[in-house]
Image (tube, rainbow, N blue to C red):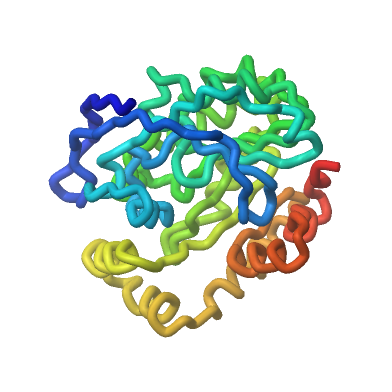
């Protein structure tokens, strides 16, 4: 049975910027046969999405394509479906596997504060013999440190691609730069393996060295993923660059319209040499589609240490 509710999302505004305005979020409950699904993501076997949609409303988020399958007509960020599953997760089926939270939502989006769907998932799998990856932009993740510490093998990634909170506000309604850094530090200080997920890397706007300098004391490793533009959000991002950062318009045209890979090849070389020289653990996720294809071809997970520095921790098993 579906239930409808509304909640107001508060957003800071600035007349000199192009922030995402506040909006009414439509929240529905949706019955699900299972919360655990097989994944095509290269580094995990299963994915758990307690929600579909996300009030963070990231302007660049690839998962906005989900509207084609869910029947939602509103803008990405204006709806969130809460999955309701009567069956408990069979933790034994996850034995020796890698599980990711989440791929088409942020597991700690604002709806989670009251619905507790992600926390209920962790309560069911925290003692399973599997590697659990959690990726979020929200400081709410620190609420569940008690459960995360009970996990046998857990990695928590906080996504952040800038130290400029103005640019961050232009791109999403998630936690501020400061709140995300505080959350990463709290997780690290609690003994949880932490990742700063530099994603998506915006050409000319993301400074990986500055991000590393700001987090070196409390990030155990770094993941780098480049900005991919396709679908309807490609035009939105290119328009934003033209209006707010016209000095970068030619670069974005070269990368995203003329398909010139030179910029990314240079950045791969830069962060690879920098991290190698500094002894920093990292994962290069620039070639996501190729890694997905490799997994499909071999039927096996892409080992993280094949896309990482030699110092990166080994994969599960």
Position of residue 26 in the picture relative to residue 275 (left or right): left
**Which quadrant: the C terminus?**
top right
Please indicate, yes or no, whether residue 281 appears anywhere in the rendered image. yes
Q: Is residue 217 above or below residue 259?
A: above
Q: Residue at x 66, y 64 (%)?
A: 291
Q: Nearer the viewer, residue 299 or 277?
A: 299
Asked if residue 308 is positioned above or below residue 9 in the image, the reply reads below
Closer-to-camera residue (1/68): 1
Give the residue displayed 25% in from the left and 69% down from the top. Answer: 242
Which of these two is toward me, 108 or 179? 108
* The quadrant where residue 115 appears: top left
Residue 19 drawn at (x, y percent): 22, 46
- Residue at figure coordinates x 77%, y 26% from the top left: 152
Q: Position of residue 275 (x, y in %)?
A: 71, 56
In the image, 262: left or right of 23? right
- Residue at horizontal 78%, vertical 55%? 303
Pick out the residue farthest to the top: 146
| Quarter in which the N terminus is drawn | top left
Examine the rendered structure and indicate whether residue 286 appears above or below residue 94: below
Q: How many marks?
A: 0
Measured as percent of width and height from the top left, residue 27 is found at 29, 31
- Identity of the residue furthest to the left in this view: 15
Is residue 167 visible in the rendered image? The answer is no
Residue 219, given in percent of the width and then of the height, sits at 65, 38
In the foreground, 260 or 207: 260
């Amino acid at each position: 049975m579906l239930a409808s509710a509304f909640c107001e999302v508060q957003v800071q505004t600035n007349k000199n910027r192009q922030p995402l305005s506040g909006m009414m979020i439509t929240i529905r409950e949706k019955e699900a046969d299972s919360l655990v699904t097989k994944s095509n993501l290269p580094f995990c076997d299963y994915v758990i999405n307690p929600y579909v949609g996300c009030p963070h409303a990231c302007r660049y988020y690839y998962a906005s394509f989900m509207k084609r399958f869910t029947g939602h007509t509103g803008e990405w960020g204006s709806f969130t479906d809460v999955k309701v599953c009567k069956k408990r997760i069979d933790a034994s089926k996850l034995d020796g596997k890698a599980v990711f939270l989440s791929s088409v939502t942020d597991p700690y989006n604002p709806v989670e504060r009251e619905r507790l769907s992600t926390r209920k998932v962790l309560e069911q799998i925290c003692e399973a013999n599997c590697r659990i990856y959690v990726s979020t932009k929200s400081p709410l993740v620190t609420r569940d440190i008690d459960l995360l510490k009970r996990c046998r093998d857990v990695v928590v990634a906080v996504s952040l691609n800038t130290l400029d909170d103005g640019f961050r506000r232009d791109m999403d309604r998630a936690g501020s730069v400061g709140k995300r850094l505080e959350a990463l530090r709290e997780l690290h200080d609690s003994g949880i393996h932490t990742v700063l997920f530099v994603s998506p890397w915006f050409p000319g706007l993301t400074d990986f060295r500055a991000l590393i300098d700001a987090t070196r004391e409390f990030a155990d490793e770094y993941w780098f993923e480049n900005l991919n533009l396709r679908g309807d959000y490609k035009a939105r991002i290119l328009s934003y660059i033209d209006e707010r950062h016209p000095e970068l318009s030619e670069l974005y045209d070269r990368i995203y319209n003329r398909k010139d890979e030179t910029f990314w090849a240079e950045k791969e070389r830069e962060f690879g040499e920098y991290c190698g020289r500094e002894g920093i653990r990292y994962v290069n996720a620039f070639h996501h589609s190729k890694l997905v294809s490799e997994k499909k071809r071999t039927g096996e997970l892409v080992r993280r240490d094949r896309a990482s520095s030699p110092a990166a921790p080994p994969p599960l098993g």
